[in-house]
Image (cartoon, coloured by chain):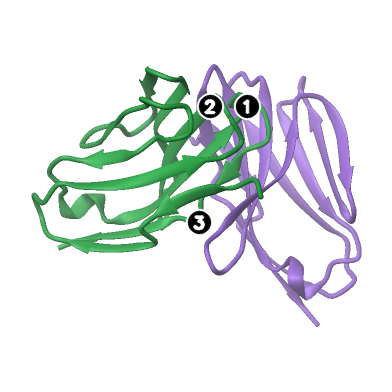
Amino acid sequence: KNEVEQSPQNLTAQEGEFITINCSYSVGISALHWLQQHPGGGIVSLFMLSSGKKKHGRLIATINIQEKHSSLHITASHPRDSAVYICAAYNNNDMRFGAGTRLTVKP
Amino acid sequence: EAQVTQNPRYLITVTGKKLTVTCSQNMNHEYMSWYRQDPGLGLRQIYYSMNVEVTDKGDVPEGYKVSRKEKRNFPLILESPSPNQTSLYFCASSWTGGEKLFFGSGTQLSVL
């Protein structure tokens, strides 16, 4: 079993839909990262969480430390949100990545 | 502009020919790290550095070397590349590993 599990693996949505991507981890963490990788390959950091909830535009990230679970939500999804979303658990300089969720938003 | 500069973007080489992938950041970050990304395996950490002259192994360090002689630079060295090191490589930096990460644009390496 992977230390960081993401679901779903693939997700197709219609423009405007509310999207949730889940991340569960079995390791201790001091921070959890959400990353976005566009088809061109570049990686952008969306959020770094150690507790609670963060919001940036249409993106919301939450984390429940007790349940070892984090979610990334996208409100009013748009085709430009199509990308691979990756969560990463960080502890003591060690970074463990989920396999990623490939999101396709259709117009 | 705050950025992590990684070069080259693409590299094709042959088995055994030493190569270096450069990584430089202009944000005075203390933490720098290298990752490789492979289909079906995702991203995996190769090496990281907490500061100048401080480096440590990540998940998959075999076959790689790094150095951190200056704060801004963190090159990845493959002394004797092998085909199983064909991969997409990313460098990243942050104030600490737990802070927001800034990624380079990636290096697609093919070892023939």
Assess whether mark 2 and mark 1 are in contact (beta carbons under 8 angstroms).
yes
Chain B visual colour = green
Could you tell whether A59 is left or right of A8 in the image? right
Q: Find numbered disc 1 in the image and state the secondary structure of the residue it sits on.
A: loop
Q: Which residue is mark 2?
A: B31
Disc 2 residue type (three-letter): Tyr
Q: Label 3 crowding class (10 Å Cα cut-off): few <14, some 14-19, many 20+? A: many
Chain A appears what colour?
A: purple
The residue under label 1 is B95
Residue drawn at x 17%, y 55% is: B83
The answer to whether any part of residue B105 appears in the image is yes
State the mark number for residue A39. Answer: none
Q: Chain of mark 1?
A: B
Q: Secondary structure at mark 3?
A: loop
Q: Quadrant of the C terminus of chain B?
A: bottom left
**Badge 3 sits on which subunit?**
B
Q: Earlier in the sequence, mark 1 or mark 2?
A: 2
Which residue sits at x=56%, y=59%?
A: A42
The span from disc 1 to disc 2 (Cα, nearest Å) is 6 Å
Q: Which residue is at 77% across, 75% downward?
A: A79
Question: A91 above or below B23?
Answer: above
The image quadrant that residue B7 belongs to is: bottom left
Give the CA separation, mark 3 to mark 2: 17 Å
The subunit letter for the residue under badge 2 reads B
Horizontal and vertical percent position of residue A57:
90, 53
Does the residue at mark 3 contact the one at mark 1 (Cβ under 8 Å)?
no
- In screen coordinates, is B55 left or right of B29? left
| Residue B105, disc | 3
Q: Position of residue A13 (x, y in %)?
A: 78, 71
